[in-house]
Image (spheres, helix red, strand yellow):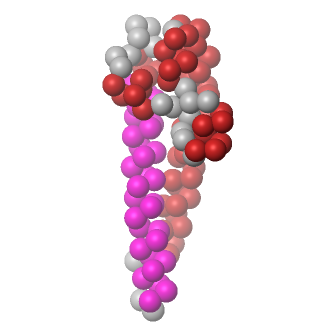
Amino acid sequence: MNLTAAMTLGFAAIVSRWYLILLAGKAWGGISKAHPEYAAALYASGLDMAFYGMGPLNWTPLFRWPAPVGIEATIKRLRRVVLGTGLLGVAALIYVPATILYIARGG
């Protein structure tokens, strides 16, 4: 267990979360112009993000609904970023506390 690796992984998870938020914000204009009803279902409200810790995108429309015509590439990119951010977050949630506990136990 390496503290530098844990800190780097935690930092990468935080940066990827911010990248997801920025990318979702950038894509919002094109999606809302092309398909306003899909955009209303896809994006979480600011209150949900602030109070419940939700991400900027709702999972059901993103992964279970077919991508509307004209914005398939944008939706595929959002899906990839959400999955990558989720994987980094899960890895950080496992490795960082394990490293801290390992060091705290004298390892």
Percent coordinates x, y for residue 93 in the rendering? 44, 61
Question: What is the number of callouts on the image?
Answer: 0
Q: Is residue 2 visible?
A: no
Q: Looking at the image, is 68 positioned above or below residue 86?
A: above
Q: Residue furthest bottom?
A: 106
Tell me the quarter of the picture where residue 98 sits. Answer: bottom left
Image height of 1 relative to 77, above or below: below
Give the residue at x 51% y 72%: 4
Residue at (43, 52) in percent of width and height: 88
Residue 94 seen by the camera: yes
Vertical side of 80 occupied by 71: above or below? above
Position of residue 11 relative to residue 80, above or below, is: below
Q: Return the residue nearer the eye: 5 or 34.
A: 34
Q: Say if the magenta span includes residue 90.
A: yes
Magenta segment includes 97: yes
Given residues 5 and 70, the one toward you in this image is 70
What's the residue at 40%, 77% (across, down)?
Answer: 1
Q: Which residues are magenta?
A: 76-105
Q: Where is residue 79 shown, x and y percent of the image? A: 41, 31
- Which residue lies at the image location 57% right of the left edge and 49% below the top edge? 15
Give the prevailing secondary structure in the magenta stretch: helix
Q: Position of residue 95 (x, y in %)?
A: 41, 67
Residue 76 x %, y %: 39, 25
For the C terminus, the quadrant is bottom left
